[in-house]
Image (spheres, rainbow, N blue to C red):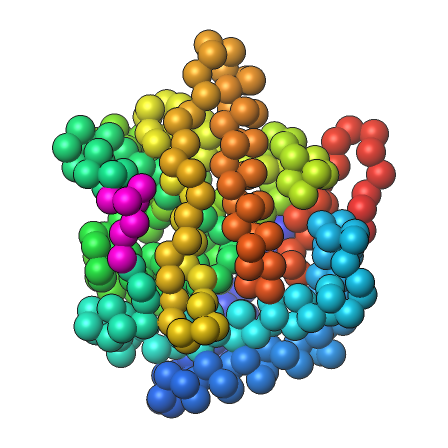
Amino acid sequence: MAKKSETIVRIEYIGARLALGLLRALPRSAAIRVATRFLRNVPKILPKLRKTGLRNLEIAFPQKSVEERESILRGTFENLGRVLGDLSQFPKYTREQLAELIDFELDDEMRALYDLNKSEKRGVLLVTGHLGNWEMLVLGFAALHESISYLARPLDNHKIDEMLNRRRTIFGNTPIDKKNSAMTVVKILREGGLLGILADVNAHPKEGVFVPFFDIPACTTAGAAMIALRADALIFPVFCVWDKDVRRYKLVHGKVLEPTKTGDRKNDVVETTAAYTAEIEKIIRAYPDQWMWIHRRWKTRPPGEEGLY
C-alpha cells in the first residue's frame, strides 16, 4: 500500500480531531446519542458494509431470519456509536466517573487469577476483541486496577494514531507496535505483566492459523498463542460489554486458559488459538449485537476453497 502524503495525513487528522472535539464538547449522553445517530446512517452511505454484515450473520447464524439478522446488524452500528461517543469523552473522565460507568468488580475466578498474577508473577495475556467497548476496557482497567501494555497495529495515519494513543494512555497504559515486538512482549509477561491483544479479526495466511469460528474455518492470528507459549503466560478472554438493563458497562469473560504444551509446536499454536477463539465465540453469541459484524472475518480461506464474500 502506498504511503499517504503528509497533506492527506493532515486533512484526515484535522477531520478526526474536529469530530472528536465536537463530541467532547457535549455531555456524555449527548455525545453518544449524536455518534449513534451518525453511525446508524453509515449503511446507507456505505452499503458494502451492510452487505458484509448481513453475509457474516448469514454464515454465523444460518437459522436466524433475515429480520433477526437485520436487528443484530443495527445493534452493531449502535454499539460503534457508543464506542465513538465514549472515546470522545476520555480526556474528561476521572477514576471516580469510570467507577460509576463500569462495573469492574472482580468475580471469584478473576480474583483468583489476579492473586496468582501477583503472588507468582505469572504473566497474563488479556485476549479481547471488537465486542462491546474495547477502548473502555483498556482505559477502565488502568484507571480502576492497574495499567497494562497492549499490542496494536499502528494506523496508516500516524497523527490520528498518536491522538488515539494519548487517550488510551491517560492512566498509564503502554502501547506496543505489533511489528518486531516479540521479545518485548515476552519479557513483559515473563516478569508477571499484563498484556492486552485484539484477536478476533481475519489474519493473513502468513500470520494466522485456521481454527473453527462459528463452525467455519477462520484464519486467526497465531501471535497470541505463540506469545503465551514462549512466555508461559495464562490466557484470559475478557470484554467490556454494555448492560442495557442497568445502563452501565460490565466485565464479562471466558475461561482462564493454559497454553497447550505437547511438544509439537505447530499443533500447540493451533490448539491454543482454537481454545481462546472458542471462548471469544461464546461471548459473541451471548452479545451478538455488540460485535463488529462489518469486518470480513472469513475473508482468508484454506487453499483451494472458494471465497465466502
Label count reads 0
**With respect to residue 257, does 126 lie above or below?**
below
Instruction: Confirm whether residue 88 shows in the render.
Output: yes
Q: Residue at x 20, y 52 (%)?
A: 146
Left or right, 118 with respect to 262, comes to: left
Q: Which residues are magenta?
A: 105-111
**With respect to residue 23, does 295 lie above or below?**
above
- Pick whichever, 197 or 140, lies toward us: 140
Instruction: Confirm whether residue 197 shows in the render.
Output: no
Q: Position of residue 89 (x, y in %)?
A: 34, 77
Q: Residue at x 33, y 29 (%)?
A: 233
Left or right, 156 with respect to 150, comes to: right
Q: Position of residue 287 (x, y in %)?
A: 55, 59
Write down the quadrant of residue 295 in the picture: bottom right
Can residue 194 be found in the magenta stretch?
no
Q: Position of residue 246 (x, y in %)?
A: 40, 74
Left or right, 201 with respect to 164, comes to: right
- Pick whichever, 156 or 227, lies toward us: 227
Q: Position of residue 59 (x, y in %)?
A: 76, 50
- Pick whichever, 11 or 279, lies toward us: 279
Q: Residue at x 46, y 9 (%)?
A: 263
